[in-house]
Amino acid sequence: MKIEKLAILGGIKSIDDPHPHWSWPVTSPEEIKAVTQFMENGCKNKNGYPVVVAEFESEFANYHKAKFALTTNSGTSSLHAAFFAVGVSDGDEVIAPSLTFHATASPLKQLNAVPILCDCEPDTGNIDPIEIEKKITKRTKAIVVTHLCGHPCEMDEIIKISKKNNIPVIEDCSHAHGSTYKGKKVGTFGEIGVFSMNNQKMLSAGESGILITDKQELYERALLFSDFGPRLESGIKLKKHFRYRETGLGSKYRINPICAVIALEKLKKLDFYIESRKQRLDYLSQGLLDIPGLTPPVTRDYVDRGAYYGYRPFIQKNELNNIDITTFIDIMSAEGMEIRQSNNPPLHLLPLFKEPVSVIKNFELPNTDQHNKRGYYKKGDLPASEFFFNNTFSLPTFTFESEELIDKYINAFTKVCNHLRRNKLF
């Protein structure tokens, strides 16, 4: 077999299509019309907030067969409200995945709680239920899980642990709009499901978030935490919360109503977007199957990735002359590919999470060396999360792009991997 010369060594690059190779979010004529009408007609209010916000919350709750939905200005704000709603406070511990975006756990620092970081399953990157159970103590107040890249966590096992120990579960579904686990949508297993709707997410609405729950108590606590004024007058039903109906609890996490207009229109097409992306990424996975040194992302046969936020194949370095991930990415970039390592290193490697101290109470912190104590972390403490991060790379999450472009990616990987199997790079 003739081995083509790599572009990084002066050969012809495999992909000459101009960047970017994918475009998201898409904007439909219906969205433009809805936003225009909203701005022309003014903000029609009901109970002190725009009607469109209530409409979107109702439709989103119905999509998940949930009783309550509450919009906020971001997924991070929704997580903050969710942690408060389940009672997380000063000194409490919350078990969280290390392999996730930092906002899954950073609101805990605002509540002076302690994130107890947990290792992942080696194939999906999701939080490992076995590791969750090991981390539970009498101080554990909640468990938060992230459905990484849209692949649902092992919710049967996680909910079993939750019930056994009477610990609430919060699902971070920011990667996983429309994903299902054994036929049931994520966000509906735990006490609260949280979704981001920033522009990179499948349900994109500029910048906003939403949470869902079936429990009136949790909905009202989250609402009190996130808003104030007339909306609370209509939304708070439990008498024990009446005293705070005018003021709320001091935060204002209200969604921008134009974001709600966009989200409402996007929701109507969400399943269409999900199916289109799934078709293209399944096509890409099929093309990677026979390339030595690469493994497409795992999707277990009883789950549906839904939004498929993020496409991260594995590299088997030992099959490719022990190439390191950074060099491999450089080689593929030279071939004209859009490729990168994940922007999100495991949380236990980030300064905010290395120590269980409150940066809110004491922003300037001394360096400490107490890694043998609970809540302190160093490199090597969560090896599966570090391995996943260091042995995967991120590709575009194609949604409407052509199979011809995807074929060019497959051909580029084939060219490079065949070269690396037989030759050192330099």
Image (tube, rainbow, N blue to C red):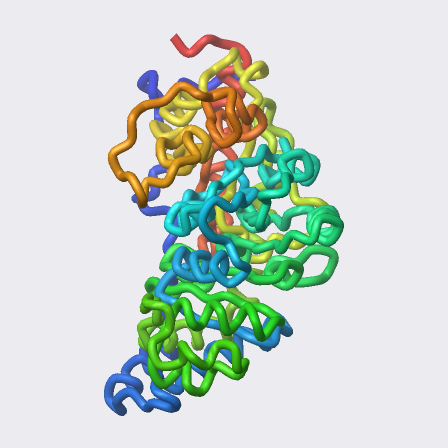
Q: Which of the pair 122/248 is nearer the observer? A: 248
Query: Could you tell whether 374 is left or right of 360 in the image?
Result: right
- Given residues 79 and 359, the one toward you in this image is 359
**How far across and how far down the image is residue 92, in percent?**
51, 46
Can I make out residue 242 in this image?
yes
Establish if 131 lies above or below 150: above
Expressed as whole percent of the image width and height from the top left, the position of residue 131 reads: 65, 34
Which residue lies at the image location 70% right of the left edge and 36% below the top edge? 130
Image point (37%, 64%), residue name: 208
Quadrant showing the C terminus: top left
Residue visible at 31% across and 45% down in the picture: 360
Quick check: 272 left or right of 107? right
Quadrant of the image for the N terminus? top right
Q: Nearer the viewer, residue 292 or 266?
A: 266
Q: Nearer the viewer, residue 267 or 321?
A: 267
Q: Position of residue 139 (x, y in %)?
A: 58, 43
- Residue 301 is at least partly visible in this image: no
User: Total label count?
Assistant: 0
The residue depicted at 49 percent of the width and 69 percent of the height is 221
Residue 32 in the image: x percent, y percent?
32, 77
In the image, is residue 29 above or below residue 86?
below
